[in-house]
Image (cartoon, rainbow, N blue to C red):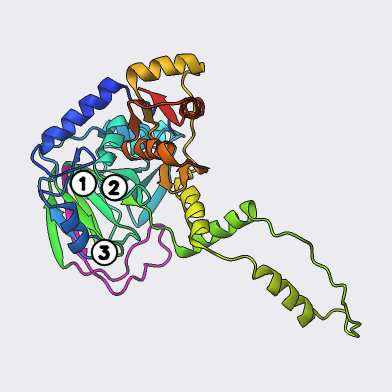
């Protein structure tokens, strides 16, 4: 999916200048403006996050779409990009990409929508835009989805199981929203349409306007003419998914010594009966397996940094360690757009793998994870070797 996630230093600087110009007086987080209309992150988290919707007019003033309708049509034909088309012609229809040119919907046809997942990995501007939302921790931030719709297009009244920011990028979209207690879905339809939807608020978004919606808040967006909406979504795994991940982690990382034995076995006249003695013996042995926070942290870090199945890494130009040092010192390094990196002492997690770091090494890696870049001011042989290895795997680029 990541054909060219590398961003040159010049391109990254230009992107930052573009975004900085949107709201020079806005509050800052991690060196970037917060697109909350002048509201502090603390106020947003306390009053809105996970609680109620927020409409932000002019969140990104003079915003211009960087991903065009033609880009969306091209994405529909790319086998490396996850896409789908949702149309409402004599009932709802869903078609998953890639599509051949002859199967593409006609631009003049009304009421269809193209959805492009992972746009932050296929467009450097998309990756830069996603960085503006890192005031929500990386452990929760997911991806950028782009929706291009012709007049009347939409995906029907629905709800998401996660928080979402809906940024209007091009044209207009009419939104109807409401907090529904009945979240039942229309049966036998290929998209999840709410059976009973009553709007309590309605508004039209223009380019640069943004709507925040908490989980399970019903909404229905309909294009007014051709329009594009950029959706910034957040990860909200079910506890079942997390439980399965923890069990898989235990299977791969925990060893219980010994083998079942029954030296005190008693004669039983019912050979097919699973005895209470055997059940109790195994139960007692498994009690030595204790859950603790360190296990959960270690498992969670690996799980949350595991790349999606559609993401792959490739080193654009392998370098010797000496050549890597020379280029890195001259230009710095930046994490690949697809790289997920977190830390929780004593671990550092990157793309589903983890290592233990302490002291100055831990601070260096934490700084790299937070900034996603480094000027390599304080280096030692071990750090150079680690970054060189990551570069060879395509996880890190020389800018």
User: Image quadrant for the N terminus?
Assistant: top left
Q: Is residue 319 visible?
A: no
Crowding at label 1, few (<14), some or many (≥20) Cα neighbours within 10 Å?
many
Q: Which residue is mark 2?
A: 232
Which mark is first along the chain, 3 or 1? 1
Q: Which residue is mark 3?
A: 218
Q: CA distance from mark 1 to mark 3?
A: 17 Å
**Residue at horizontal 45 percent and vertical 49 percent from the top:** 304
Q: In the rendered view, tell whether residue 321 sits above or below residue 21.
A: above
Q: Is residue 186 magenta?
A: yes
Crowding at label 2, few (<14), some or many (≥20) Cα neighbours within 10 Å?
many
Q: Is residue 374 magenta?
A: no
Residue 305, horizontal then vertical, whole percent? 45, 45
Badge 1 marks a residue whose secondary structure is strand
Q: In the rendered view, tell whether residue 366 sits above or below residue 398.
A: below
Q: Which range is magenta?
A: 171-199
Q: Nearer the viewer, residue 80 or 47?
A: 47
Residue 303, horizontal then vertical, whole percent? 49, 50
Which mark is first along the chain, 2 or 3? 3
Q: Nearer the viewer, residue 168 or 257?
A: 257
């Amino acid at each position: 999916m990541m054909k060219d996630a590398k961003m040159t230093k010049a391109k990254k600087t230009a992107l930052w200048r573009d975004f900085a110009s949107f709201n020079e007086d806005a509050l800052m987080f991690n060196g970037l403006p917060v697109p909350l209309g002048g509201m502090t992150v603390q106020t947003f988290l306390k009053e809105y996050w996970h609680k109620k919707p927020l409409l932000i007019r002019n969140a990104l003033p003079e915003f211009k779409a960087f991903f065009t309708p033609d880009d969306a049509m091209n994405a529909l034909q790319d086998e490396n990009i996850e896409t789908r088309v949702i149309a409402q012609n004599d009932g709802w229809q869903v078609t998953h990409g890639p599509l051949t040119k002859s199967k593409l919907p006609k631009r003049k046809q009304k009421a269809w929508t193209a959805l492009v997942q992972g746009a932050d990995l296929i467009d450097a501007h998309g990756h830069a835009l996603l960085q503006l939302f890192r005031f929500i921790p990386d452990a929760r931030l997911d991806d950028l989805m782009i929706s291009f719709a012709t007049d009347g297009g939409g995906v029907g009244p629905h709800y998401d199981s996660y928080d979402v920011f809906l940024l209007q990028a091009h044209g207009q979209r009419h939104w109807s929203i409401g907090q529904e207690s009945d979240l039942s879905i229309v049966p036998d339809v290929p998209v999840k349409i709410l059976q009973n939807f009553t709007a309590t608020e309605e508004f039209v978004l223009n380019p640069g306007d943004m709507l925040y919606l908490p989980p399970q808040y019903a909404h229905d967006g309909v294009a007014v003419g051709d329009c594009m909406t950029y959706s910034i979504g957040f990860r909200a795994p079910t506890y079942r998914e997390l439980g399965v991940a923890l069990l898989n982690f235990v299977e791969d990382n925990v060893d219980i010594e010994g083998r079942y034995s029954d030296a005190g076995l008693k004669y039983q006249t019912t050979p097919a009966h699973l005895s209470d003695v055997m059940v109790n013996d195994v139960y007692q042995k498994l009690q030595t397996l204790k859950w603790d926070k360190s296990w959960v942290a270690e498992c969670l870090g690996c799980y949350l940094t595991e790349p999606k199945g559609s993401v792959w890494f490739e080193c654009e130009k392998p370098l010797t360690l000496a050549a890597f040092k020379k280029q890195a010192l001259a230009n710095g390094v930046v994490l690949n757009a697809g790289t997920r990196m977190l830390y929780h002492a004593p671990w550092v997690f990157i793309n589903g793998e983890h290592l233990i770091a302490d002291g100055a090494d831990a601070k260096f890696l934490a700084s790299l994870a937070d900034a996603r870049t480094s000027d390599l001011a304080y280096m030692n042989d071990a750090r150079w070797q680690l970054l060189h290895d990551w570069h060879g795997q395509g996880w890190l680029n020389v800018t």
